[in-house]
Image (cartoon, helix red, strand yellow):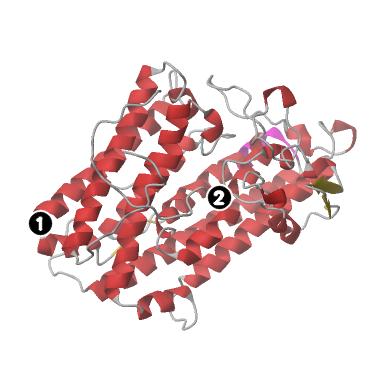
Amino acid sequence: MNSMTRPLPLTLAISMLVMAGCGDNQGTANAQPATNQASASTPTKTGVVAHYADLAHAKFQDAVVTAEALDQAIDTLIAEPTESHLEAAKKAWLAARVPYQQTEVFRFGNAIVDDWEGQLNAWPLDEGLIDYVRSDDYQHQLGNEGATANIVANTEINIGGTTVNVSTLTPELLADLNETGGSEANVATGYHAVEFLLWGQDLHGFDAGNGERPVTDYARGADCTNGNCDRRADYLDGVTDLLISDLEWMAAQWAPGQSDNYRAQLLAESPEAAIQKMLFGMGSLSLGELAGERMKVALEANSYEDEHDCFSDNTHNSHYYNGQGIANVYTGSYTRVDGTELAGPSLSALVAELNPELDNTLRNQLEGSMEALGTMKSAAEADVDPMKFDMMIAPANEKGSEIVNGAILALVEQTGSIEQAARELGIDSLEPDDAGHAF
């Protein structure tokens, strides 16, 4: 369900990129420096891999905690639809994105994560599958028969000649509706489905403003706007419950002290094989996914439909915390949502023992990419004239294009050093996924 599905060969001839060029303010409590000095004694590869699993477990646990807080806020909204409760649910969604986006570095190389994540984070989606849209400003995948199915408004839908009973909106049913009719744009679950149900369509294009769903879309009786408020609430409740159960399952896969989960399988492999997964994940998220699919595509096409968090205009934070997740794996450090610090044996220390200059270069590049992503974040959250990602990628926005290109270039440069680090650690050909993009 995600566009990043196939590993492709990488040719890194790093040069300046020439390219034409759908949030609320979110705190940076979990942000941390990209650099981490190597420990006095070099850790073992086995220790580095075990700590990598600890990082994954902590992040997925935090994703569960913040999703549970989101669920509580949504339950309150449904029980008493008020402006303040809608705003609280939106803030809870934004907070839930912080740890989750830092987990995406575990996707590439760990097939169990990549095969699972589409149900939680697939995008872009044709939101008309889920609920009402304004048809005069609705861009959807050409030929998608489910693009206007509107599950909320109907008790059965027919897509591609197949009729599906959707009278009872259970989490299981919603999961089964993903990619219905064979279209990857038919996304019925995950963070972005919740986002759309909270914010609604962003009808502002390249101008300032995000989705403006009225809270009365969840009102009862005569106060209900746009119809089907009870089913809309059922959908929102069911899709959030599914989000939690999916995250709990993945957190359990990384939990220590078990003999039959993914963590046990990973630790049973050779440490060299696991370290290859670590570096492949860093390089592939850095290059093909973040620099390529999430920024280069949107900028070159001037397409706000290719914006990651398009309904909330939170894309700058999603990009920022993706970058932080890459740095976390290399430095072996993570700031949890409760403020505690998790640190341990790191790739940085292993590389520093073999090639201190390369380690210093890569740590500096990771810091540089976080600065570039931080510039994007700061511009989007400025008190005066904020420029969100969908505004940055507008045609003829030279300043916005410069900001996005700066982040892309920084990510491309650090990927080259990630490949060099792999070679120092005995991995001859890392070939991180470039998603078919030329850099």
Q: Quadrant of residue 402 in the image?
A: top left
Q: Residue at x 45, y 25 (%)?
A: 393
Judging depth in this view, the residue of 44 and 338 nearest the camera is 44
Magenta residues, as a range?
81-89
Q: Please tell me whether residue 349 is drawn above or below residue 77 in the rendered image.
A: below
Q: Residue at x 75, y 45 (%)?
A: 78
Picture quarter with the C terminus: top left
The rendered magenta stretch, by its main secondary structure, is classed as helix
Left or right relative to 66: residue 154: right
The disc labelled 2 sits on which kind of residue? Asn
Q: Is residue 105 shown to the viewer in this render?
A: yes
Residue 399 x/y as whole percent = 35, 20
Residue 213 x/y as whole percent = 69, 31
* Total count of labels: 2
Judging depth in this view, the residue of 220 and 46 nearest the camera is 46
| Disc marking residue 356 | 1
| Disc marking residue 121 | 2
